Image (tube, rainbow, N blue to C red):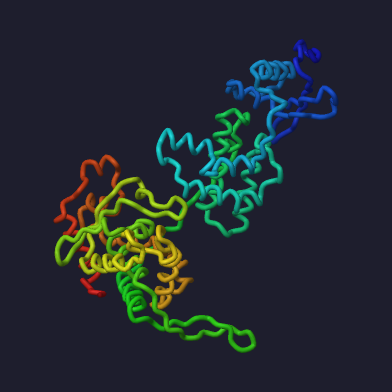
Amino acid sequence: MSGELNGVEKSMDYYLTKRKKTTRSYFYVNFTDPEDPRKVRLSTSVELLRRKYGDRSKMPVTREKEAYFIVERAISEGLINLDREIIFFADFVKEFWDFDNSLYIRRRNQKSPNSIGKDYANLMFGNFVRHAIPHLPENLKINEVTAIHIENVVDQLLDANTLSNATIQKVVQSMSVPLKEATRKKMIAHNPMDGVEPLSNTPKERGIYTIEELLKVMEYLYKKGTVGVTEMRPVRGPDKTVVEKPYEVKTDLKPYLAVALASYTGMRAGEIRALSTDQIQIIDDKYGIINVDRAYNYYAGLKSTKGKRSRRVPLPRHLCDALLKEASINPYEGSTLVFWNKKSEINPISPNYILNQFYIALEAIGVTEQQRKERNVDFHSLRHTFNSFLRGKVNEKMLRSIVGHESITMTDRYTHETDNELIEVGRTVLSIFSDEDLR
């Protein structure tokens, strides 16, 4: 034994200190090296030890004798391990979100298949590495992380004013989930997230396009994919100045088809990129139906749709024919991809290619980058536009089914609406676009 004090027989080498915090003082226990009493191997709050062995009392520890009893109980229950492995917080979080090697992700996906996808894991990994690590102390151990460390990351990101509150919340989430697991596995005495002040988030409302803007954009992209257009490009002029120079530009029809699909059906970008000919069903000389049952993600590759629910959407026949024609010139034998990539046999075209061409078309019709940002519109806004203009014009249940907002219960009750019902929605969509033929 290591001695006796206040009637408590000490089973290890340690001493108590008091630290003043905010409105009161807290007892801390400091475990020392038997060979060198000046060396503290572990310092932790007595009240944290009390919580660690399950006592949730909120009464402060004010008597030294009570503090000694708490420390001895923690020792007797094996909660003090001076020889524990040193785990650095940054390494722990990076390993936690490493999709291919994370024990946590593997266990979660075994219990609930596909509950954590590779795209989500990589998003969390990237948020932590890019936005959290630069604002954390070097060699910060996981047992040393406090609410102050987390809040300092948030404060630094808020001060920089380069990220939205929603993105900063994702940065916090990249740390909070690993810390919760570390607490569950008793790697740390308590979760420092418990003391973190929540970050309010009032997201800016996403804007929508006008039908006139969409018709002009589709007309521009169709022309660019068939006969070509003249675009101004910045080039270096005399004396290193930058001047605009006209260029004749001709692309393929994929940007036009992607924007048309999103506009006429509300399909998501990943669902559009994953489209194959087996999903396209011709109904008659005016309409077809697409079975939306898959999506493509940069990290995860081909996967199920958001919410893991398939749905069917109507589409004008001329667009169905254009999609099938694009797939017919796919150079890869056996591939049925519509949005094929000439650089890859298995991957569809890059989302950046569609996005860049879409933004160039917006500029061409008079929607500048500044206006786009002020209105908060992007490619996904095509889906919001579709939903907004159809609301009140078609049955609400049908609309939710087509855009994929059905609950699982409602989907089971209302699945596989008839072709006639879908065609009626298709007629409504065409009427919204003034039945304009962009072929």
- Left or right of 69 in this view: 241: left
Q: Please state the horizontal and vertical placement of residue 205, each as a whole percent of the image.
A: 42, 58
- Left or right of 430 in this view: 245: right
Residue drawn where x is 15% and y is 67% of the image: 285
Residue drawn where x is 30% and y is 63% of the image: 261
| Whether residue 282 can be seen here | yes
Quarter holding the C terminus? bottom left
Q: Residue furthest front?
A: 333
Q: Residue furthest bottom?
A: 238
Residue 193 image-quadrant placement:
top right
Q: Please state the horizontal and vertical placement of residue 319, each as a whole percent of the image.
A: 25, 67
Q: Residue furthest top?
A: 7
Residue drawn where x is 38% and y is 62% of the image: 381
Residue drawn where x is 47% and y is 52% of the image: 299
Q: In this figure, what is the number of numbered marks?
A: 0
Q: Please state the horizontal and vertical placement of residue 121, each as a whole percent of the image.
A: 50, 46
Relative height, residue 374 to residue 85 (above, below): below
- Left or right of 124 in this view: 381: left
Relative height, residue 248 to residue 166 (above, below): below
| Whether residue 391 can be seen here | no
Quarter holding the N terminus? top right
Q: Please state the horizontal and vertical placement of residue 266, each as a whole percent of the image.
A: 31, 59
